[in-house]
């Protein structure tokens, strides 16, 4: 009835081995998938690298056109800046001829009736009492004082 | 001088009270003509065109203008008046002759209605500034018994500087007789038109970086230089400066009178939306038609003034500076404002006024009548 000492563990070992093989197979499969994925990724990397280089050179080739577009859109004309003396002279000419644009304002005409020539600056004489005291006759006399009619 | 005075009243020097543009224009239009004449002397003295050979005004004249209305408004920058080209364009609308009839009608009867007080002041000043009414200091120091007619003096100046007559004779359509100088700039118009054509070519090619570029900076420079030569040859030792000041004052006065619905415009029932229309209606009132292209002439007067002043000032001293005449912004490193928009306005309105399309010419204008002499 005795059982060899290693007979007990032998059966589990065989099972373990089988399990291990199964694990190894799984790992191999996984490794293969990883390798495939790595290959794919490597292909993408190459593609990316190629595109990057290509676009880079394309961008480089487009740079003069880009410069032209920038120059065309720019507001600075070619030419040499005026020297200080000429600049001051041009500014002075502009300042001396500067004016207010006539379409920025409206003229209005509002003036009071000036009345008759012999009226006082305050307005027409009131009719009735007090008129002479106000100076109507003196005004008339003033105008006629130098004439023969006054004497 | 008149538009510059309005500007100075709106932006006064030395902390004085600023007026609104409408008030400033009304103040000038209602000013005592003697004050205006004294201000003219003040502006003339400030320009000091005979420097360093002594100022034009003596102590008595200085003392007089120190008592005048506009004494505190000495222009900060001189000369504070427009180029004679400004007066020429405005006078070519016939506004001076039309206003002469207006003054005559108001002064001799009531056919045009009863003038308001403001219009009566305007009549006083107009007779003084334009038609030689006597003042203690006459605006027309350049008129006398030797040359009594202010219009004849102006026509003489136009003829000498531009080689041009006005487009009309007397107001009854007879030839206008005046002293014509022998030395005159007959090449001015061809040179100016050729310059404007080249400037337009440069404008259209300003942003052309790939196609055929017909801009020619060297030609622009040479034409500008040639124009400077001919203009300054008539102005040696400040000759014609006084005539220019007075002509621009007279025509500037009329321009201000027509710029808005001023009292005289209202009294003449000529309210309109533009100076040219007001002038046309006033012309109808007094039976004298203005120039058919008055609108174009008025529209470019200020711009031509600036352009001619710049050309005379020797600013374009080489082809590398030709951009001043056609660019809208200065190149990097320069802070001045170029004359691109100014030149563009002159090109457009000159074409409209003369009927010659400066933007599409097939052959250049002949600027010299004489041919090169053959080698012998």
Image (cartoon, grey):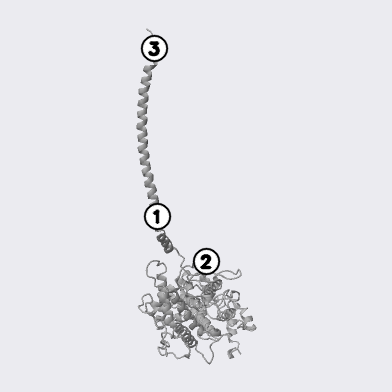
**Label 2 – label 1 distance at C-alpha:** 34 Å
Secondary structure beneath label 2? loop
Q: Secondary structure at mark 1?
A: helix
Q: Residue at x 37, y 28 (%)?
A: A24
The N terminus of chain A, quarter of image: top left
Q: Earlier in the sequence, mark 1 or mark 3?
A: 3
Work out whether residue A27 or residue B244 is closer to the camera in this orientation and state it: A27
In this view of the protein, which residue sits in the foreground, A143 or B76?
B76
Question: Element at badge 3?
Answer: loop
Q: Count residues near mark 2 (Cα–Cα under 10 Å), then give few for <14, some for 14-19, many for 20+.
A: few
Q: How many marks?
A: 3
* Residue A4: mark: 3
Along the horizontal axis of the image, is B34 left or right of A25? right
User: Going by the picture, which residue comes out furthest to the top?
Assistant: A1
Residue B333: give its label.
Answer: 2
C-alpha gap between disc 1 and disc 3: 77 Å
Tell me whether marks 1 and 3 sit on the same chain.
yes
Find residue B345 and report its horizontal and vertical position in percent.
43, 73
Q: Residues within 10 Å of mark 3 (few under 14, many from 20)?
A: few
Provide the chain ID for the residue under circle 2. Answer: B
Residue under numbered circle 1: A57
Which of discs 1 and 3 lies nearer the camera? The answer is 3
Residue A11 percent across, percent down from the top left: 36, 17
Task: Chain letter for mark 3, please.
Answer: A
Q: Position of residue A17 (x, y in %)?
A: 37, 22
**x, y (%) of residue B143?**
53, 88
Q: State which quarter of the image contains the C terminus of chain A.
A: bottom right
């Amino acid at each position: 009835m005795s059982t060899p000492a290693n007979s007990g563990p032998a059966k589990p070992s065989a099972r373990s081995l089988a399990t291990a093989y199964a694990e190894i197979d799984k790992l191999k499969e996984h490794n293969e998938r990883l390798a495939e994925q790595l290959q794919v990724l490597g292909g993408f990397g190459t593609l990316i690298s190629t595109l990057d280089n290509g676009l880079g050179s394309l961008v480089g080739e487009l740079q003069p056109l880009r410069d032209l577009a920038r120059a065309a859109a720019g507001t600075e004309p070619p030419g040499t800046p005026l020297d200080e003396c000429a600049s001051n002279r041009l500014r002075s000419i502009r300042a001396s001829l500067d004016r207010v644009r006539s379409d920025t304002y409206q003229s209005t005409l509002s003036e009071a009736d000036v009345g008759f020539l012999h009226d006082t600056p305050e307005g027409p004489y009131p009719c009735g009492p007090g008129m002479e005291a106000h100076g109507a006759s003196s005004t008339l006399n003033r105008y006629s004082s130098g004439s023969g009619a006054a004497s | 001088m008149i538009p510059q005075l309005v500007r100075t009243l709106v932006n006064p020097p030395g902390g004085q009270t600023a007026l609104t543009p409408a008030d400033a224009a009304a103040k000038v239009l209602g000013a005592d003509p003697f004050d205006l004449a004294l201000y003219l002397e003040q502006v003339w003295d400030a320009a000091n065109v005979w420097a360093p050979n002594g100022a034009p005004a003596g102590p008595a004249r200085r003392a007089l203008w120190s008592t005048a209305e506009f004494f505190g408004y000495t222009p900060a920058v001189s000369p504070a008046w427009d180029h004679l080209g400004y007066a020429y364009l405005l006078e070519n609308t016939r506004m001076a002759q039309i206003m002469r009839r207006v003054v005559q009608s108001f002064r001799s009867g009531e056919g045009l209605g009863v003038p308001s007080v403001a219009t009566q002041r305007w009549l006083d000043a107009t007779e003084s500034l334009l038609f030689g009414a006597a003042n203690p200091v006459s605006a027309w120091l350049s008129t006398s018994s030797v040359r009594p007619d202010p219009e004849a003096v102006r026509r003489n100046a136009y003829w000498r500087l531009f080689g041009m007559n006005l487009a009309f004779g007397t107001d009854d359509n007879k030839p206008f007789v005046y002293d014509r100088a022998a030395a005159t700039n007959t090449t001015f118009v061809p040179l100016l038109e050729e310059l404007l054509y080249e400037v337009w070519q440069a404008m259209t090619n300003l942003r052309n970086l790939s196609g055929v570029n017909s801009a020619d900076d060297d030609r622009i420079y040479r034409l500008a230089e040639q124009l400077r030569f001919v203009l300054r040859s008539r102005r040696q030792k400040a000759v014609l400066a006084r005539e220019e000041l007075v002509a621009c004052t007279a025509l500037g006065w009329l321009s201000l009178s027509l710029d808005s619905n001023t009292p005289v415009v209202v009294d003449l029932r000529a309210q309109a939306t533009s100076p040219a229309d007001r002038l046309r209606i006033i012309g109808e009132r007094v039976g004298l038609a203005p120039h058919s292209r008055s609108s174009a002439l008025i529209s470019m007067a200020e711009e031509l003034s600036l352009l001619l002043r710049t050309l005379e000032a020797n600013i374009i001293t080489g082809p590398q500076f030709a951009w001043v005449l056609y660019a809208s912004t200065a190149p990097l490193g320069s802070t001045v404002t170029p004359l691109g928009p100014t030149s563009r306005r002159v090109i457009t309105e000159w074409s409209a006024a003369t009927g010659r399309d400066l933007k599409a010419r097939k052959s250049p204008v002949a600027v010299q009548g004489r041919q090169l002499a053959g080698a012998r």
